[in-house]
Amino acid sequence: MPGQAARVYEVRSSYFPGLTTAYLQGGTPLATSGGDLPLEVSAQLEKFMSIDQRYQVRLTIGPRFSPALPKATIAKAWKEELAEVKKLLDAAEPESYRRLDAIAATCAVSLESRCLSTESEKFLKLPRRGLLKEIAEAWLSTFNQ
């Protein structure tokens, strides 16, 4: 629910995942069982309570594409979005970015709803972290149906 704190949450949607922007706000007051925080602790935490630290904008994966859209249209959008996040992915794993770009190109011209080859599927199932992991999971759920 907007405006409320959340530790863990899950988004369920009939829409296929895509890159989207998340707006996050932190800095809820800290509760302690002993009352006020010691001055030394408050001073250390103060830098995290500034506006630039409390309000964050993050690139993330979220519901984006209608199930009615052709998979090729979704793949074309992903290919364009990959170009925008190339710096993030290329810096971490340049070969993974090239493979993702090739998979997106293949799916963008495919007439099949399941456009992933066995090799592409194996690549997407490799252990990953961060945005690369989220993209791989999103593609497996979108292009394997």
Image (cartoon, rainbow, N blue to C red):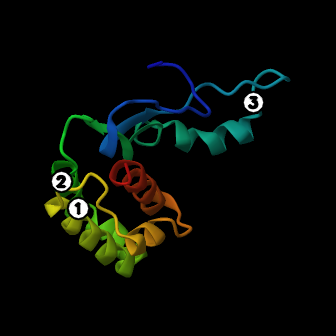
Spatial CA distance of label 3 from label 2 is 55 Å
Residue at image point 34% right, 64% down: 116
Instruction: Please give the residue where the numbered disc 3 appears in the rendered image.
Output: 37
Spatial CA distance of label 1 from label 2 is 6 Å
Question: What secondary structure is found at the residue carrying circle 2?
Answer: helix
User: Quick one: label 2, few (<14), some, or many (20+) residues within 10 Å?
Assistant: many
Instruction: Please give the residue where the numbered disc 1 appears in the rendered image.
Output: 107
Instruction: Please give the residue where the numbered disc 2 appears in the rendered image.
Output: 72
Q: In the image, what residue type sits under mark 2?
A: Ala
Whether residue 95 is situated above or below residue 117 in the rendered picture: below
Q: In the image, what residue type sits under mark 1?
A: Cys
Q: In the image, what residue type sits under mark 3?
A: Leu
Closest to the observer, 12 or 108: 108
Mark seen at residue 144: none
* Whole-percent x, y for residue 112 in the image: 23, 56
Question: What secondary structure is found at the residue carrying circle 3?
Answer: loop
Between discs 3 and 2, the one toward the N terminus: 3
Closest to the observer, 70 or 9: 70
Question: What secondary structure is found at the residue carrying circle 1?
Answer: helix
Residue at image point 18% right, 45% down: 70
Q: Do callouts 3 and 1 mark residues in contact (Cβ within 8 Å)?
A: no
Single out the mark in the foreground, 3 or 2.
2
Closest to the observer, 2 or 83: 83
